[in-house]
Amino acid sequence: MTAQYVVDGLALGAVYALLALSYSLIFGVIRIVNFAQGELITLGCMGALAGWSLSAGMPTPLRVGLMVLGAIAVSCAGGLAMEHFLFRPLLKRSSPTLLGLIASLGASIFLQNVLRLSISSSDIVFPRLVPVDPLGVFGLQIAPVQFVLLATTAVLATMTVLFVERTRLGLTIIAVRDNRELAEANGIAVATVLRGVFIASSLLAAAAGVMMGLYYGVARYDMGFLPGIKGFTACILGGLGNVRGAAVAGILLGLAESLGTAYISSAYKDGYAFVLLIAVLLLRPHGLFGDGDAR
Amino acid sequence: MLRVQNLRTGYGNLEVLRNVSLHVDAGEIVVLIGANGAGKSTLMNTIAGLLRPREGKVLFLGEPIQSRRASEIVSRGISLVPEGRQLFAPLTVLENLTLGAYSLPRKQRTLAVQGKLEEIWGLFPILYERRRQPAGTLSGGEQQMLAVGRALMSRPKLLLLDEPSMGLAPLVAKEIFLAIRRLRENGTTILLVEQNARAALAIATRGYVLEVGMIVAEGKSEELSSSKEIVRAYLGKDYKEVWE
Ligand SMILES: Nc1ncnc2c1ncn2[C@@H]1O[C@H](COP(=O)(O)OP(=O)(O)OP(=O)(O)O)[C@@H](O)[C@H]1O
Ligand SMILES: [Mg+2]
């Protein structure tokens, strides 16, 4: 049955991979742990729900389009607001790392409560647009939604890596990440790059939010918190700021969680990620694929 | 070309530049010498727009630029090589240079990059051999060459060089000084900060001496090199003389 758990782990890992990428983009540039990153997932999912319910009665393809649009709009608005009100002022301070940690934790709790009070404190049904009933494929039970998850992640992860490593804007991201002062002296508008990074990161979080909605069939005000932390874990595992590493580590994390739950105990479901993290950091302090200043 | 008037810059409560005025004419190499902590880098960074002055003006080609953003100052034609061989370590030599042209208008860029690259390969042939190598893996001298090359990519009218020979072996430093002289022959105006005052005065047209945030002496290179006080404070004796 191991193969079955591997398939389930891959699907879970796909969500983590999206999150890890989303984290990696921002963390790479601002070097601040953003605890509110998970809330961008929630915002994306809620935005998708809003797009869906506001378009009730319209043809389905249109509704799906509005759903995607809603996810993108709400998540990006959240990301840009974080950049503007939280991180930009912090980056001008003398110890942004610690301040950012605390401030973003505050922002996370604040956003969760705003969502809880303004929308709902319990589960909201997310439309099952992709069938979740498993089909037998080569003796494995694979749900179409798992295919969608893996395919979406594969496409988005490839696009992110190409974007960072092959485009001009991507080069400026690496430049700002490596040496902000020089980037500025070089004529790169650092503020614009930061905004671009937050938008890209919010897009990935929005995708993760929609995928989670499709997979679990529900949305909740705090749905992003734990996955957000796991995304951060994967981002560290992969080597901070290393986009390729982050994607692979996300998948590994999903596998660890699925196999750990199956063969050890489901009681520690949320703990396997951190065991893996500690093990890797002991053996390879810069992460699985990091070498300190990797791309 | 560049005129700095009554400039004051500081950090927090610390006043670093206290009323600095100087000018650089087109075609000159002007050297700025001064002890550690005199405020030379602060001055360079203020001209480049990385620091905001509290008072005073920076005029470039007759226009005030002291409140402009660094990215705009680069587009206007001032390029800074910051202190300490700064480059983008994970990017290759070629990528570092390409990024140097970031501020050029889109239409001119491709052609300009090609032309400038040729010029830089001519100036520092070793960089051509290393072009696909991450900048972080270069030797100190090569890194400084790359730092200068990066700054040249934006086609500056005025190049600000902050201690380009710092920490380099004498032969490598000499190579950098030769390159600076060739840049000037090709029409680039240069403001140069140097601890290595003797070598700097040898290639400069004029010089200024900065002491605790104030200009205390200025003049033609030959005048400065022969002034007793400056010889004592900044030129010292050659190591050779000391050792013998
Ligand atoms: N970012 C900063 N924050 C606070 N003080 C600073 C900062 N940068 C420089 N200083 C202070 O300003 C003064 C001038 O520094 P600056 O770097 O301009 O000197 P310098 O002439 O370039 O010295 P060096 O020859 O060592 O490069 C020093 O006293 C330094 O401690
Ligand atoms: Mg200095």
Image (tube, helix red, strand yellow):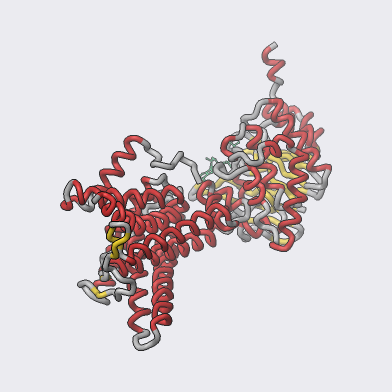
x and y percentages locating residue A133 in the rendered image:
26, 68
Between residue A249 and residue B75, name the one nearer to us.
A249
The image position of residue A219, as x and y in percent, is: 27, 70
Whether residue A273 appears in this view of the structure is yes
Where does residue B192 sit, x and y in percent of width and height? 71, 41
Q: Residue at x 79, y 38 (%)?
A: B181
Q: Residue furthest top?
A: B244
> What's the residue at 58%, 51% (across, down)?
A183
In the rendered structure, the answer to whether residue A158 lies left or right of residue A143 reads: right
**Is residue A279 shown left or right of residue B133?**
left
Which residue appears at 28% of the width and 72% of the height?
A115
Give A149 or B132, whichever is nearer the viewer: A149
For the question of whether residue B38 can be seen, the reply is no
Q: Would you identify the image quadrant in which residue A142 lies?
A: bottom left
- Where does the image place residue B179, in percent across and percent down from the top left? 76, 37
Q: Nearer the viewer, residue B141 or B50?
A: B141
Is A201 left or right of B195, judged from the image as shown?
left
Numbered circles on residues, count: 0
In this rendering, position of residue B54 left or right of residue B74:
left
